[in-house]
Amino acid sequence: MRFSKSNDVLGTSNRGNPTESSLCTLCRADCKGKCETWLSSLVGRKLLYPRSFGIVTAGANNTTHVGVSYNSLRIQGYAYGAHGLNEGLSNDPDDCIFPNVGLETEFGKEVKTKIRLPLMTGALGSTFVAEKYWDSFAIGGALIGIPVVIGENVVGVDRSSEIEPGNTRNGKIKCSPELERRIDGYLRYYDGYGAIIVQLNVEDTRNGVAEFVADKYGDKCIIELKWGQGAKNIGGEIQVRTLDYAIFLKERGYVVDPDPTLPGVQQAFENGSIKSFARHSRLGNTHIDTVEQVRSEFMDSVKYFRSIGFKRITLKTGSYGMEELAMAIKFATEAKLDLLTIDGSGGGTGMSPWNMMQSWGVPSIILHSKAYEYANILAAKGDDVVDMSFAGGFALEDHIFKALALGAPFTKLVCMGRAIMIPGFVGSNIEGALHHAKRGEVNGLWSELPKTVESIGKSAKEIFAGYFDVEKKVGKNEMKNIPYGAIAFYTLADKLACGLQQLMAGARKFSMNQITRDDIFSGNRETAKETGIPHVADVNDESARKILNS
């Protein structure tokens, strides 16, 4: 493992067991710190460097690479050259500095979506975490200039939404306060970079979510079809703790377990032997038996969504096997979709069966390696391959670089789920601790600042390294409307951006479209075999021998 529970060099520590991404296996909203992502949400790019500068030396301890993972990939560096400098810059050393690395990029076919940083959020749907901290995620994402995804079931679980029920695609939404709040919150600070993406599952399709979004927002939103995710191979889930809400969801057409309408279950709940209910979504495409049927229905869906006004359509697929991966890439390419997000096993936002997360699906690096391989097959035939986003266990700037390089030139951005939720948590907790009257409003879980935060500062201006950057962007008067969680998100993104710029400058790549698979190498032979990325001792070995023999 690259990550241990504590990192003396950065002064960080994990409360629980660290995963491949560096995050704790179980990430708590009330955590008082301080993993690398948690602390980066406060101090930003300062955490790129060892602590106690001037009285320390520091050496890397990641010298042995065991197993196949993104952490067994290493980033190539070069001693000469500079590629992709922006217009007006030359290869003079005064211009070839890492702040001049351009991180802006875009994705899409007929309509290009511009982004300031090759990053997007995971789908934040009907989980109560997404609802509580939405303002932090959405406003932060809009200020950064990246896409934010509204996940499945938001309309269906909202008690205030009014839906005339239908079957396959006959539902009609009269109003959906929660969905509208989420879209409007992002659009308020949208400045032409990024996008708000609305995801659909079986229930959303039945309820008419796409039609509602098209009618109210037109082409301001992107619609996303969903085949699955990396956390589980069944539909989305949440847990509810009241009987009346469980019955409401059952009547809305969801699968609720145990069945809250059964007298025996109600009695068990009243007596305390049942304390909660799980709400499940349905599996898609259960009526389909062949690949050609999948293709036909998929193309029909895309055609329909275009007919109701969506100019941009994306697809999210999970860590299924190779056949489904090939279908996703092939069909998304044929349909001229704007983006395909490929999510490897396994993570989620808190309601995926634990042993399912542990044991189902294709690990991210394997899935992403095959995605490149399959995309390359289509490109060799002359197809204009769909732009891709890789997801599944990313949290740090080197993860972004490695994923972009592994899938280059097809991968345009990286999707982060749990990592970008942490700044929402910690920022909201700080806001609640500093302004007690707002604690409930912002879902703050601390009554006072912990020592881990007080060691940095005692006011928002002291605590958040990105505070004044946000203030410059929105103006002093508007700062009162910016949640601290959004400031924390902006601060974390600044650290990721700066770290990515440094890695790219070291690889002599000064714009996003210059990153290639040649910029990474494998730390062990097994990883080289599975990814197609050569071992460190083999990369440029031939040219090295030519130098020696010249």
Image (cartoon, rainbow, N blue to C red):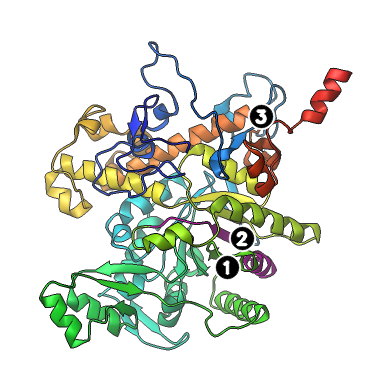
Measured Cα–Cα span from mark 2 to mark 1: 7 Å
- Residue depicted at x 43% and y 63%: 356
The residue labelled by disc 1 is: 311
Task: Identify residue for label 2.
Answer: 111
Q: Is residue 531 left or right of residue 460?
A: right
Q: Residue at x 21, y 30 (%)?
A: 454
Task: Give the Cα distance between marks 3 and 1.
Answer: 36 Å
* Contact (Cβ within 8 Å) of mark 2 with mark 1: yes
Q: Secondary structure at mark 2?
A: loop
Q: Which residue has dot 3 on it?
A: 508
Q: Position of residue 301 (x, y in %)?
A: 57, 78
Amino acid under label 3?
Arg
Residue span colored magenta: 326-348
Q: Position of residue 47 (x, y in %)?
A: 40, 29
* Place of residue 35 in the rendered image (x, y in percent of width and height, measured from the top left): 35, 37
Amino acid type, mark 2: Val
Question: Disc 3 on helix, strand or loop?
Answer: loop
